[in-house]
Amino acid sequence: MAREQFQSLSEQMYYILLALWEPQCGADISRRVSALSGQRIQVGPGTLYTLLARFEEQQIILETGSQGRRRYYVITDKGKAMVRAEYTRLQALVKDGYPYLALEEGGYHEE
C-alpha cells in the first residue's frame, strides 16, 4: 500500500509551513526557516520551489500575489491542520521516548 502523501512532514516541510503563517515570498521563506530552526535547517531554492508547488497543488498553501518575479504564499486552514497534526505526532514521539531516554539523565524506565 502506498504511503499517503504528507502523512508526516519532513523538517523542511514543517518549517516552511510554519514560516507561511504570514504571507512570504521564496527568499523570505528561506530566511524565516533558518531563523525558526536556529540555523539548523537550510532550504535551497530547488527544494523550496518543488515543495511550494506540491503544497499549492494540494491546497496546503495558496499564492496571495506577486510583485515582479516574487510570488507570495500563505498557509491555508488545511495546511494549518497538517502542521497541528504533525506537532501532535512529534509530541507523542517525545512522550514515548522519554522513559527510555530519561535514563541517561537519571530518570527511570518502566516496562
Image (spheres, rainbow, N blue to C red):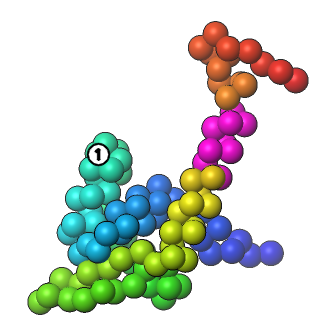
Residue position marked by numbered label 1 in the rendering: 39
Spot the residue most to the right.
111
From this view, report whether residue 84 is shown above or below residue 107: below
Boundaries of the magenta span:
89-97
From this view, report whether residue 33 is shown above or below residue 111: below
Residue displayed at 62% across by 15% down: 104
In the image: residue 108, left or right of residue 74: right
What type is the residue that disc 1 sits on? Answer: Gln
Q: Would residue 92 be counted in the magenta stretch?
A: yes
Residue displayed at 31% across by 43% down: 38
Q: How crowded is mark 1: few (under 14 residues within 10 Å), some or many (20 or more)?
A: few
In the image: residue 17, left or right of residue 10: left
From this view, report whether residue 109 is shown above or below residue 48: above
Q: Let me know if residue 35 appears in the view.
A: yes
Residue 76: x %, y % from top left: 46, 78
Residue 39 in which image quadrant: top left
- SS for dot 1: loop
Residue displayed at 23% across by 75% down: 25
Residue 105 in which image quadrant: top right
Residue displayed at 34% across by 63% down: 19
Residue 90: x %, y % from top left: 61, 48
Q: Which quarter of the image is occupied by the C terminus?
A: top right
